[in-house]
Amino acid sequence: MSKILMVSSEAAPFAKTGGLADVVGALPAALREFGHHTRVLIPRYQVTRKLPAHRIWDSLPIRLGNSYFDTSIYAADADPNFLMLDCPQLYDRPGLYFDAAGDYPDNPLRFGLLCRAAVEVARKIFRPDIFHCHDWQSGLVPVYLKTQLANDPTFFGCKTLCTIHNLGYQGWFDPGVLASLGLPAWLYRTDLLEFYGTVNFLKAGLVFSDWLSTVSVRYALEIQTPEFGFGLDGLLRARSSALSGILNGVDYTTWNPATDPLIPANYSENDLSGKRQCKAALLAEFHLPERAMTRPLIGLVSRFTSQKGADLIAEAASALFKEDLYFVGLGSGEPRYEAMFRHLAEGNPGRVGIQFGYNEALAHRIEAGADIFLMPSQYEPCGLNQIYSLKYGTVPVVRATGGLDDTIESDTGFKFREYSGRAMLASVRECLQAYAEPPRWRRLVRNGMCKDFSWRQSARHYSDLYERILNL
Ligand code: ADP
């Protein structure tokens, strides 16, 4: 029975760019089942302002270095456990982290303020037993607690947990930000916040938190190696006795083909006829021919980045499309990968359909309508789409890394280890072979649909971890 204050830059449905939001949006309710009281603090971005919320704290003044911010705190009408830090000059912008001109240059200030405000929320509104911080944006919470506020009795006994959702994003900034964030210059040391000439917010969280976790058991091991460590593997090895891997759960109230209102027809493992309707509708939506109904349809929903294996798709594309298959993709990301996917669609008319952008409903329709889901990630801390795919009877073909390795087994999907187009292609071909054998395919589909990756299991692990941290 503990009190947890989560600090995060995203929480679904209030602000989302990726899996982090899904986790922070769903975990609190699952923790409630175990008796924990959780509040979540996120910034009140422009998108967040559009959602109904009420002000619960009028004036929360925060001093950072020589700057002074008069902030206030809102609670979401939909769930008042989700608190939003209002400071329009920093957060009322079109993007969460960047706009067309690039990353917001004051991101260190924006997320430094979030961290410092979290401590004030703890003082005035909700004093937690544990600050549960997520990713680099909340990395300074334990730093403030253990430096500026080290002697403040309000926080005696408060513990900190830092969860890594993606080690590839660390928040590297000019060392000058320390002074503007009101932090002492001595923190700029190689064994503390310094990282190759920058101040590294995630490293701050990893050094100063009482415990660390990441979002799958496999990724917890991988990040301790140079290949996956992004320069922090040494630190993570040094802290390995305080590092846990807890697989994310998924929210089956939004991701369940039996009840999903965003797909053309509902279905379950006992009656898959609705899935055929979903496939027919998806083909029509992407202007793909009816003949594809009897051929394998591969789906992809992804950020178009190197992390997600876009290079492997480029490498394997010509051989891949020699197979008698169809392909639909949804995503957005780096311009060079968007151009690659555009090229694929233009070069394979009537075979390949790509939609660019972020479209939640279409992501559901692809999960439901595709036969196969492709996730050839270079690295994948947990990955959610492959878990959704299992539930939607869409057989995953994944690279055996991180959470993909932990969630996909030979009775539910196909995995390849080597990061190469050749290995991916071999795995896709194995999958096509299975597709050609209907009884085997039905077994694969059903096995996947019966798997349970609900939040309950993950919440139990977090609950045990909180208890362990409180007894440190
Ligand atoms: P990551 O957080 O690294 O992007 P995850 O697999 O953990 O990857 O989570 C991705 C989440 O974002 C899923 O809920 C997925 O459906 C969603 N998503 C990713 N790209 C898009 C898109 N273009 N449109 C809609 N949803 C998307």
Image: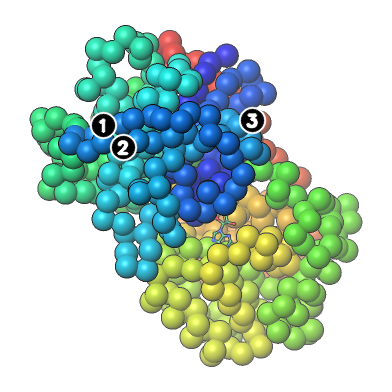
| Residue 252 percent coordinates (x, y) | 71, 44
Which residue, given by chain and number where applicable, does mark 1 sit on? 63
Secondary-structure class at tag 1: strand
Q: Are marks 1 and 3 in contact (CB under 8 Å)?
A: no
Q: Residue at x 14, y 44 (%)?
A: 175
- Tell me the amino acid under the disc marked 2: Phe
Determine the residue located farthest toward the front in the rendered image.
58
Q: Earlier in the sequence, mark 2 or mark 3?
A: 3
Q: Are marks 1 and 2 in contact (CB under 8 Å)?
A: yes
Which residue, given by chain and number where applicable, does mark 2 sit on? 69
- Tell me the amino acid under the disc marked 3: Ala
Q: Quadrant of the N terminus?
A: top right
Figure quadrant, ligand 1? bottom right
Q: Quadrant of the C terminus?
A: top left
Q: How is the image coloured?
A: rainbow
| Residue 271 percent coordinates (x, y) | 89, 56
Q: How many marks?
A: 3
Label 1 to label 3, Cα distance in Å?
35 Å
Disc 2 within 8 angstroms of ligand 1 (CB): no
Q: Residue at x 34, y 30 (%)?
A: 61
- Tell me the amino acid under the disc marked 1: Arg
Q: Is residue 106 above or below residue 232?
A: below
Q: Is residue 449 left or right of residue 216?
A: right
The answer to which of 432 and 6 lies nearer the viewer is 6
| Dot 1 alpha-carbon crowd within 10 angstroms: few under 14, some 14 to 19, many 20 or more | some
Q: Is residue 374 left or right of residue 445?
A: left
Residue 30's disc number: 3
| Residue 118 percent coordinates (x, y) | 39, 29
Q: Earlier in the sequence, mark 1 or mark 2?
A: 1
Q: Earlier in the sequence, mark 1 or mark 3?
A: 3
